[in-house]
Image (tube, rainbow, N blue to C red):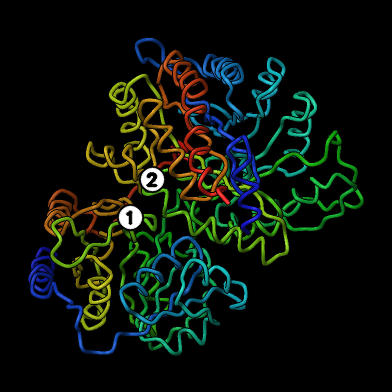
């Protein structure tokens, strides 16, 4: 363990556990606002997301993820199509779903769409599988929420088979059987990275380890440190299964502006409105100024503030959670496109270098042997 | 109903304290369910000093690692064994699995129903669609040999540990504890108090409908006085808590946060 640690610490990318540090951005295709905060069209929102992805590449962001959604707030059901447009205009940034709601999709089609993205992007595709806490795709595609666990269990297992790349033989209850079936396109350089997004289910953590998928902790409220046992559970499950360690990532919402005050002022009214709308169906407490101050403070789950504030918080939580990846879910319904572009630029040019600096400093004492 | 409320308030204000030096043996708690909720309740109970067993639907081996890492100190077991040795059973299984839950497993026990019927999140379930009854009333009908107490359903599993406070803390929150059997409500209220919340007693499962999703205290972080005021205001403003008429179905229009 000591020798591994030393090797980690000398990783110039500032990663731990031998994995490079990855700092990404996620969007749900939050409905764009115009200069006055009036909602823009779904089509304009989607074109804006393409520009945001291109900018993320230019300013040095490692990953750009798009979460599948089917609502007026988040008109983003075909993330892979949008990612392909970004892929065609970029050369460096990794591109993926955040998340793909696999339970209400066909694993074969998901594999095909993302291996196509992998081809277009020259091997930059990733997939994060999960439910999110969204459920609108279930009635839309004719699935019963009560079957959620069975659907997810079967479909993630099939997805793991598909990733292996050879002909697939599979039998289950949730789709037609496959018998020695070739599934194309083949990927050029082996399976693309696949993660499972977990909100609070220990079984999902163990499942990710069992299937050999990386773990993405979705932390949208409360103290991030509370998730540290999940990170431990994941690594211990991998160990028990005789698998090599795999990276752990964190996904959390936030917003950047040049100052803490401006970031909070831009984010707060939209956050309040969004939670107010979903609170009755989702059981979220409606935020107060007090709770917002807590969530945006050092012990909360929202990364809202200046680049320095957000960078410190990211570095601290990556360390606390034994994670090597952070994806900031930027944007909120009706925030104007220019505010999001500023957010992305600050994240790439200021937050990312600062987080790397913090983590490299922390790594020095650990390698001091 | 108004009378019920005043009774409840009197009782609730009389016994706020469970001292750390409480001489009696603490009850053994069996938590059924190792998903989002079960391990959190088990952990909070262990911290409060209770001996705890945890069981899922099958072989304890399947939850051994989860138990060891997430609930150190708890004993993973077969559901039947865990229940048999316990004084209180906490039911924290996905509600859609309740339709096939074996009632004889928990016969004779105090059963804490921490579940919710929440169609927009978990889907429509026929067994719980009769809106004349609260979900815990339906649970009680199915588990006729057990004594049902409704609590722990109204606070997010994310918050249950963060929000615990010692007795007397100004920011200690309240949780409703509802049941038809006063003795069982007292026993479970003692657990809630010891875990770190003020217990606000409601004297029937019927009254406990006010704790359900869409109700005035669900997902809200309220101190005792605020909690009681919210219940009273809800009763004054809206007869749905006293009327058996089915509420209108909640429309599904959600954005996602994860």
* Residue pointed to by mark 2: A221
* Relative horizontal placement of residue A102, taking residue B22 as reference (left or right): right
* Relative horizontal placement of residue A277, taking residue A117 as reference (left or right): left
Query: Can residue A262 be seen in this snapshot?
Result: yes
Which is in the foreground here, disc 1 or disc 2?
A: 2
Q: Look at the picture and state if A34 lies above or below B240.
A: above
* Relative horizontal placement of residue A81, taking residue B203 as reference (left or right): right
Q: Position of residue A315 (x, y in %)?
A: 46, 39
Chain hosting mark 2: A
Q: Look at the picture and state if B241 lies above or below A30.
A: below
**Residue closer to the observer: B234 or A278:** A278
Circle on res. A243 = none
Q: Look at the picture and state if A84 lies above or below B96.
A: above
In three-dimensional space, the C-alpha distance between marks 1 and 2, rounded to whole angstroms, equals 33 Å
* Residue pointed to by mark 1: B246
To the question of a shared chain for discs 1 and 2, the answer is no
């Amino acid at each position: 363990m000591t020798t591994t640690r030393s090797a980690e610490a000398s990783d110039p990318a500032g990663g731990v556990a031998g994995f490079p540090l990855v700092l990404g951005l996620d969007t749900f295709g939050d409905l764009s606002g115009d200069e006055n905060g009036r909602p823009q069209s779904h089509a304009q929102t989607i074109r804006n997301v393409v520009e945001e992805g291109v900018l993320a590449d230019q300013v040095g962001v490692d990953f750009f993820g798009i979460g599948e959604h089917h609502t007026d707030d988040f008109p983003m059901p075909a993330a892979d199509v949008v990612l392909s447009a970004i892929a065609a205009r970029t050369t460096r940034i990794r591109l993926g779903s955040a998340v793909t709601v696999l339970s209400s999709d066909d694993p074969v089609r998901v594999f095909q769409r993302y291996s196509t993205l992998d081809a277009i992007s020259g091997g930059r595709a990733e997939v994060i599988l999960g439910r999110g806490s969204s459920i609108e795709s279930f009635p839309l595609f004719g699935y019963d929420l009560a079957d959620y666990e069975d659907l997810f269990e079967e479909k993630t297992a099939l997805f793991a088979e598909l990733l292996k790349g050879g002909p697939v033989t599979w039998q289950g209850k949730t789709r037609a059987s496959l018998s020695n079936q070739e599934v194309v396109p083949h990927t050029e350089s082996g399976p693309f990275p696949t993660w499972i997004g977990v909100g609070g289910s220990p079984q999902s953590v163990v499942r990710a380890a069992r299937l050999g998928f990386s773990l993405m902790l979705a932390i949208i409220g409360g103290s991030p440190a509370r998730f540290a046992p999940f990170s431990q559970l994941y690594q211990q499950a991998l160990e028990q299964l005789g698998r090599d360690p795999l990276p752990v990532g964190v996904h959390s919402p936030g917003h950047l502006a040049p100052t803490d005050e401006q970031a909070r002022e831009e984010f707060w009214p939209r956050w309040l409105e969004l939670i107010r709308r979903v609170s009755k169906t989702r059981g979220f407490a409606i935020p107060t100024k007090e709770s917002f101050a807590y969530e945006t403070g050092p012990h909360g789950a929202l990364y809202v503030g200046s680049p320095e504030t957000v960078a410190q918080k990211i570095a601290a939580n990556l360390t606390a959670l034994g994670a090597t990846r952070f994806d900031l879910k930027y944007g909120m319904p009706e925030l104007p496109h220019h505010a999001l572009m500023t957010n992305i630029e600050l994240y790439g040019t200021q937050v990312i270098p600062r987080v790397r600096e913090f983590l490299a400093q922390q790594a020095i004492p650990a390698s001091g042997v | 109903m108004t009378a019920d409320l005043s009774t409840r308030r009197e009782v609730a204000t009389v016994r706020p304290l469970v001292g750390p030096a409480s001489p009696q043996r603490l009850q053994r708690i069996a938590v059924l369910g190792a998903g989002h909720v079960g391990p959190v309740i088990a952990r909070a109970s262990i911290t409060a000093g209770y001996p705890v067993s945890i069981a899922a639907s099958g072989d304890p081996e399947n939850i051994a690692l989860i138990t060891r890492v997430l609930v150190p100190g708890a004993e993973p077991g077969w559901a039947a064994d865990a229940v048999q040795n316990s004084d209180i059973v906490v039911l924290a299984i996905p509600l859609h699995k309740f339709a096939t839950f074996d009632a004889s497993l928990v016969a004779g026990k105090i059963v804490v129903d921490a579940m919710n019927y929440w169609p927009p999140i978990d889907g429509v379930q026929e067994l719980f669609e009769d809106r004349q009854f609260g979900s815990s009333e339906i649970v009680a009908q199915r588990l006729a040999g057990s004594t049902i107490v409704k609590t722990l359903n109204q606070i997010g599993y994310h918050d249950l540990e963060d929000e615990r406070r010692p007795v007397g803390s100004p920011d200690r929150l309240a949780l409703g504890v509802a049941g038809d059997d006063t003795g069982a409500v007292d026993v479970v209220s003692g657990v809630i108090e010891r875990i770190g919340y003020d217990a606000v007693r409601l004297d029937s499962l019927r009254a406990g409908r006010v704790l359900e999703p869409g109700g005035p205290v669900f997902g809200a972080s309220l101190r005792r006085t605020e909690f009681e005021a919210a219940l009273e205001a809800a009763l004054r403003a809206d007869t749905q808590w006293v009327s058996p008429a089915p509420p209108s179905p909640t429309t599904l229009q959600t954005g996602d946060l994860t």
